[in-house]
Image: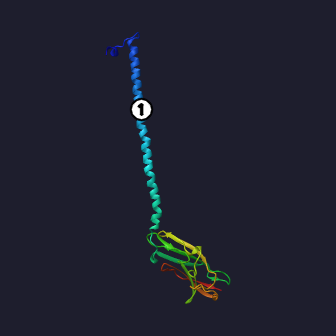
Amino acid sequence: MNTVLRPVGPEPARVYWTRRLLVLGALVVAATLVWTLIANGGGPGADAKAGSSASPAASASTEEEPAAQGSAAPCTAEALELSVLASRQSYPGGAEPSFTIKVTNVGEAGCTVDVGDATRELRITSGKDRIWSTLDCASGEGASRNLLLGAGKSDTHELSWERIRSDEKCSEGLPSPRPGTYKAQVRLNGAKSEQATFVLE
């Protein structure tokens, strides 16, 4: 104990005390560094764990969007507003009448609707005579076109008529429509548009 409190040696006592203080200071610095490394070592690991738990949550919210769209109900007749507009009032011989068809969701929520030719009908009539319909023998790429129509959103489609007659049996050799006044109307899911009047010359 005396040699600790009273250093013995050829050097003055203050030299030994200085050395001991330096060693003690070095130990304190080393202990501080070890503590700092331990504390910082836990930080990145905690951040990494937090990041790994947050990513799946973000992915899950993204994956839920298609499911929400798929749960939309079919559009009812009350939710649909239909319109048809002829490009001209009168068409000279050989000119194909063309129409702009608009389907609008006037409901309060989005709904699904097939606006393809096999479901959405454009019907041409003359008096009580049914001349032509897109439902007759509808096939190909335009036969089905399913949409998720948001509330207040519209789908607009351009369609032309080749001035031919058709029927539900896909009969051939039917008489060609004659010059006169015709009407076009759009029908879909029980809803109907106002009739657009035009003339074939």
Decide: is 190 above or below 150.
below
Q: Is residue 145 visible?
A: yes
User: Residue at (41%, 34%) from the top-left corner?
Assistant: 36
User: Residue at (46%, 52%) from the top-left corner?
Assistant: 55
User: Residue at (55%, 72%) from the top-left corner?
Assistant: 156
Q: Give the labeled residue for mark 1.
A: 34
116 or 7: nearer the viewer? 7
77 or 49: nearer the viewer? 49
Decide: is 44 above or below 17.
below
User: Residue at (48%, 63%) from the top-left corner?
Assistant: 66
**Quadrant location of the N terminus?**
top left
Q: Residues within 10 Å of mark 1 (few under 14, many from 20)?
A: few
Residue 77, percent across and down?
Answer: 46, 77
Q: Is residue 153 visible?
A: no
Q: Residue furthest right?
A: 94
Residue 38, percent across and down?
Answer: 41, 36
Which amino acid is tagged 1? Val
Decide: is 35 above or below 97.
above
